[in-house]
Every structure is written in structure tokens, then in C-alpha cells.
Image (tube, rainbow, N blue to C red):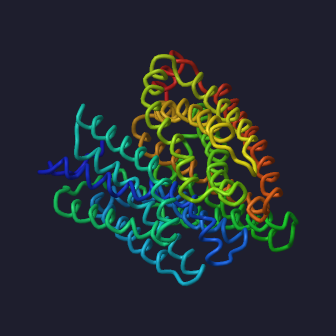
Amino acid sequence: MPTDEANAPAHPRWTLLACILASSLSFVEGSVLNVALPAIRASFSAGASEVQWVVNAYLLPLSALLLLGGALGDHYGRRRLLILGTGLFGAASLLCALAPGLALLLAGRVLQGIGAALLLPNSLALLNATFEGEARGRAIGIWAAVGAGAAAIAPLIGGWLVDHVGWPAIFYINLPLAAGAMLIAARFAAESRNPDAARTDYPGALLATLGLFGVTYALTLWSVALAVTPTIVGLGVAGLVLLGLFLWVEAKRGDKAMMPLAMFANRCFVGTNLLTFLLYGAFGAVMLLIPYVLIEAAGYSPLQAGLALTPLAVVIAVASPLMGKLAARIGGRIPLTAGPVLVGAGLLLAQRIGVEGRYMIDVLPAILVLAAGMALAVAPLTSTVLSSVDQRHAGTASGLNSAVARTGGLIATALLGAVLAAKGEALVSAFHTTLLVAAVVSALAGLAAWLTVAGPEPQKRTAAEA
């Protein structure tokens, strides 16, 4: 049984603060960028595919390297990797803010994604090593709540900065967060590692990254032109071949793989990850498009668009803990079925968003229904994923599920080229079509849960047998 090599830290509360500051970089980045995309596009006179890559240049390395980032922390030290990842994220943010052209902005976004893949899993792992028993549960609860709160207020702050300072300011605000996290972690956090648990699967990480890049690039080019060319086919086939090689390498490495395939023998684990991919893909696409359409078609300012999204994160942050307690009593099947279906209903309701974009009548009702559906699903999803595998794979299962969520958003964003290329009424029409597709995808996510997730008693048996 692997042991965690950790000294009792002298300042666990300061360690918690360092982890919160570091992880907030990623939580904030995901929500603040969406309200700035129109301004970034105008600043660089960018096309639709280039706007997609402003988002996906970050999501691609984060999706592919998240599991490797956690393994590197197990092997080389979680505090060390937290500081390294946070420093890289901060430096990359400065590069983004100062970028004179789109190429350097995209390079900065790639480096931000790599930094996030290092700091995110190690912030949580460092908390696990620092706290024990009930104190650990409280610390993780605070960590999650502050992250949700940061995500809630980030679009509002980002919108104000874009309006009054300029879009580079959304990257400058990362610098004090990164500096504070690094200084506090270096001074107060104790190092911890678990070399026996480390899965430093470099071939797997490289193949996953290149494979996802090929598929994403092919989908991005196709979504803009809506035509199949030899370049698109070549990139897509190459990406799929590399992903096939990734699965072959993972099968050969067994338990030492970045993604042990033995976990996929459990039907519930497969079903919940399929749900995650579909739900977060649909939700991620719409969360990118709603502020974009409000700004570009409905005439909202970035600040107004950020304010329009604020209730979403607030409702999710407040209601998710309650849904977690409910799922503990009734099992994951009902909330994981109902949540995505409710999200689909919210997406259909968002069909009312158009050129007029009346907030109280057209926007807010859809936002509230979307938030209720996501709140119903988020906490039960995590607990159901963890209960579907044995304890030794719990960390890997959680990390993989998080990576699958980001991959869903990555693929969905790659398919939005035609929408982002449209203007005025054509943009609204393409947006409404996307909402219909996303609603169907959300309903399929609910169906996946209904078919694969057991009720409370059978689910307990499944967890025990895994």
C-alpha cells in the first residue's frame, strides 16, 4: 500500500489559501474570457477559426495533460508542481496581455493550459495531504465554494475591465493571484509526494495531445467552411490514428498507464463519463455563445453580458451542495437523468434570445433553468464516478472525469465555426440551431445516466464489487 510522504505542515490554513488562489486562476479564466472574445476578435481582426483557437488553445493541453500533471505531483512533489504550474500560468498570462498579435496570444493560451494542468490536480492533492478527517472535508468544501464564487463574479469583473480598461486587463488580474499563491505555498505548505501512485506516462500524454490536436484542428476547419477537404480528412485521420495508438499504449501499460483501461470495465463508469462528455460539451458551447450573441447581436456591453451570466454560477454554487446531499440519499440515477434533461429545457428556452435580447423576459429564465439543471447534476456526478471504481483508482477516476469534461468543451468549441462567422440575424439563426442540437445532446446525456447508473442500493453493491 503506497504511503504519502508528507510532513505535518505548520500552517494548514495558509496552505488552503495558496491552493485556493492557484486554482482560482483556472476557475476564473474559463468564465472571464467568454465576455472578452468579441473585443479580442475585433482587436486582431480575427476570423471565426481563430476565435475558436483562443478558447481551444487553452482547453487542448488542459484536457490532454491533466492526468499527467497529477502524476508528476505524486512523483516530484505536489507543492513543487503547484508552484511551477502557477508560475507558468502567471508568465503565460503576461504574454497574453502583452501579445502584439494573435500568434503570441495563442502561444500564451497554450502555456496557460499547461500551467493549469499542473496546478489544478496538485492544488486538490496538496489539500488531501495537508488535512485529515473532518478537517479535510471542510477544507475541500471551502476550496470548491470559493472556486464557484470566483467563477460567479469573474464575468462581471471581466466585463467591467473590457469596457473600461481593455481586454488585456483580464490577463493582468491573474498576476497578483499567481504571485500570492506561489509565495504562500513556498513559505507555508509542506511538500508531499507518493511515488508509488505516480503514473508518469509520457508516451500516453504525447499521443493524447497530438491526437486531440489533429481531431480538433480538423473539426475547426470543417466547421468554418462546412466542406470536406483533403487537409481536413488528413488531419482527422491522423488524429484518430494517434488516439488509437494512445489506447494501445494505455492497454500495454496496464495499471501504470495515465488512463488505466481496466476502469472502463464498469458500466457505470463508462456511462457517467459519456454523460460528462455530452453534457459539458453542450453546456460549454452555449456558455461561449450566449455572451457572444448578447454582445454581437443584441448590443449588450461586455459588462452587461457578464452581469447576465452571474445568476448561473451563483445558483450552481448555492444549490450543488444540497443536490449532493439529496443524491447521497436517493442515488445518482434520478438527478443525473433529470439534470441534463433540465439543461436541455433551458437550452430550448434560450431560443427566445435574439436581436432584442430583453434580459428579464428572454435571457434570465433560460439562465435560471440551465443553472438548476447543472446544479442537479454536478455534485451527484462526482460522487457517482468515484463510487464506480475501487479506492486505488479514485484519484485517477476523478482526474479523468475532469479531463473528459474539458474535452467535451474542446470538441464542442471546434464545431462552432459557422456560428462565430455569422453576423446579425444570421448569427442569431445559427445560435438557435446550435441550441437545438445542444438540447438533444443534453437529453442523450440524461439517457446515458438512466441506462447505466443504478439506484442507491445497487450502486453500493457495484462500488463494493469494483
> Residue 356: percent from the left, percent from the top?
73, 49
> Residue 174: percent from the left, percent from the top?
39, 65
- Please give left or right for residue 293 compared with residue 392 in the image: right
- Please give left or right for residue 41 compared with residue 84 in the image: right
Q: Residue at x 75, y 48 (%)?
A: 354
Total count of labels: 0
- Please give left or right for residue 374 compared with residue 346 in the image: left
Observer-nearest residue: 138 or 397? 138
> Residue 183: percent from the left, percent from the top?
22, 65
Quarter where residue 449 is shown: top right
Which residue extends farthest left? 10
> Residue 391: percent from the left, percent from the top?
40, 35
Observer-nearest residue: 168 or 397? 168
In the image, residue 169 sits, relative to residue 117, either above or below, namely below
Q: Looking at the figure, which quarter contains the N terminus?
A: top left
Observer-nearest residue: 26 or 118? 26
In the image, residue 80 sits, relative to residue 409, either above or below, namely below
Q: Residue at x 68, y 77 (%)?
A: 45
